[in-house]
Amino acid sequence: MAHGRGGASEILQRFRFVFFSRKRPPFGLAVRGGWVSILGMAHSVSSWAEVAPHLVAVAAGRAPADLVIRGGKLVNVQSREVLDGWQVAIAKGRFAYVGPDASHCIGDKTQVVDADGRYLIPGLCDGHMHIESGMLTPAEFAAAVIPHGTTTMFTDPHEIANVLGLRGVRLMHDEALLQPINIFTQMPSCAPSAPGLETTGFEITPEDVAEAMTWPGIIGLGEMMNFPGVIAGDPKMLAEIAATQDAGKTVGGHYASFDRGVPFHAYAAGGPADDHEGTAEADAIARVRQGMRSMMRLGSAWYDVESQITAVTEKGLDPRNFILCTDDCHSGTLVNDGHMDRVVRHAIECGCDPLIALQMATVNTATHFGLERELGSIAPGRRADVILTSDLRALPIEHVFARGVLVAEAGVLKAECPHLDWPSDTRDTVHLGKTLESEHFEIAAPEGANRVKAQVIGVVENQAPTEALEADLPIQNGIVEGEHGVAQIALVERHQATGGVVNGFVSGFGYSGKMAMASTVAHDSHHMIVVGTDRANMAAAANRLGEVGGGVTVFKDGAEIALVELPIAGLMSDSPAREVAAKADAMVAAMADCGCTLNNAYMQHSLLALVVIPSLRISDLGLVDVDRFELTDLLGETT
């Protein structure tokens, strides 16, 4: 069935049975060229308790399986071995029999697939990620990653929480439940991420967290970014963690500090069960020694696997305490490079045994979230999420089954990924309050000075942290100007139409000429970030995003040379992933045309307001020293 959208009434009807109905919608299978072709699609999977008698009957040979896959090599991530010739029988969307001979499970209507010597591996799991960072809605994100073998995602929609609050989280959660793969939602914990250092469109409260824990698709608490609050014993943060643990669910961590001493130990005592902010081997080791899972990420711009996986490959630590994840991937990466398949390949290239790398992207993740009996391995009772691949190192994703249904073949989506009807007000979230002019981006110099020392945000390629730099900058006509690679940065308030603009300086992008880049994706407060070398271009870029309702734009010499429209919350598009990726590719090319040479510099741009990752950031309240968690002055000594 072609990838498409369902109407509002159809969506609601589907949603009713996703988690609660005992009936699965009908689907048909037809053999074509030896492989299964889907004529219809099932979007739900019955619970084990509902289908256990039938699974037992199939495994015992008393009832026929829906599907049998044979003639392959089964990768058992539970025992970390390859079992040549082992077969699987699937019924009601779950594995019923896994063993050397499934012939007793085959009936007259059983569809039999010959794996032709290929490996059977579990569907891949992403342990930590933000759908919004893909610039796509949950439906379009699912459509993009299914052909890459991702069948389970643990998502934290804290981006939309900052813009639309609990209602935005619910919309993400509801659309996630409609998909043909498993998308579990973590309730965002920190909006704002750092109270007192930024202002968001909405705030998340402990009461919101407690309510969300009752929703069917909520798996736990999203990354606890306010680590200083946890360390200080902040009652609000501890109440959110308590509500999650009382519900028997997992607390996500975020310790973005280089200090592994007493503060780190205090944070670990606060209850986070994992952490993805490590960038060095010592970070990974410190986390697992405290009983946390070390999540090693490879996103569009974060390359933190190679520097940490040596804890396993060289130090010999138990690999079952390590998880692979993406954290943030934009649409261009998803379409052009891959998703979790890309991360697993990278881990293998870094020296990891392929079977261990697969554990880190399947059963380890499932176990961490309390779902080891539900998914993450090819074993009886689990959801029948399985990939056929001809090479465990190159990992070509040749066939993808989710819940026993073929959802992708040779990189082509075979499933329907239904959309919600997003309300009109979710497409009207960029409120500037006034038309911006070039003078709104001027930084007034101290009176009588010729030059001034300024704090500068230093972008670090392929890393989330920034450097806190200092530059001696010239003054012209009473205005501080950037030079020698130092550009201007501005944060424009866009939630409450205050008209506020906070200005500063940034280096590392390499921009030249007269240009500006603006984005309403600005983790985590998601105001508007504008970076440029020319204030008139900065004003034009900011106003343009106000006109289109959000997105990313690049201006050069007064003309727009790239635009990615993100109308939903100023964060996402519900257009197909390939269309969004094509515009994102044009945006990256436009940045290069303006002199930028950084890898995936858009992701660096989008994090310049993330006031919970060191060392220097910008917010609607001013320049933020994240090492001290306090506002700091932009300008210093003058000459």
Image (spheres, rainbow, N blue to C red):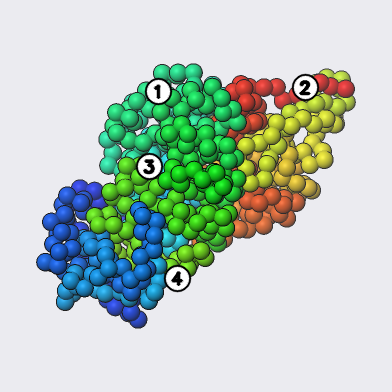
Q: Can the viewer see residue 397?
A: yes
Mark nearest the camera among 4 and 1 is 4
Q: Can the viewer see residue 566?
A: no
Q: Secondary structure at mark 1?
A: helix
Disc on the earlier residue, 2 or 4: 4
Q: Is residue 446 left or right of residue 57?
A: right
Q: Which x, y percent locates residue 509?
A: 72, 45
**Relative to the observer, which residue lies in front, 33 or 190?**
33
Which residue is painted at 75% across and 47% down in the image? 511
Query: What label sits on residue 368 in the rendered view?
Result: 3
Which residue is painted at 77% across and 22% down in the image? 636
In the picture, residue 459 is in which quadrant? top right
In the picture, residue 45 is in which quadrant? bottom left
Disc on the earlier residue, 4 or 1: 1
Label 1 Cα crowd, 10 Å radius (few <14 / some 14-19 / many 20+): some
Q: Which x, y percent locates residue 119?
A: 40, 67
Type of residue at label 4? Ser
Does the residue at mark 4 contact the one at mark 1 (Cβ under 8 Å)? Answer: no
Q: Secondary structure at mark 2?
A: strand
Query: What label sits on residue 390 in the rendered view?
Result: 4
In the picture, residue 539 is in which quadrant? top right
Query: What label sits on residue 477 in the rendered view?
Result: none
- Where is 358 relative to 170, above or below? below
Disc on the earlier residue, 3 or 4: 3
Label 3 Cα crowd, 10 Å radius (few <14 / some 14-19 / many 20+): some
Query: What label sits on residue 238 in the rendered view?
Result: 1
Type of residue at label 1? Leu
Mark nearest the camera among 2 and 3 is 3
Does the residue at mark 2 contact the one at mark 1 (Cβ under 8 Å)? Answer: no
Type of residue at label 2? Gly
Disc on the earlier residue, 2 or 3: 3
Mark nearest the camera among 2 and 1 is 1
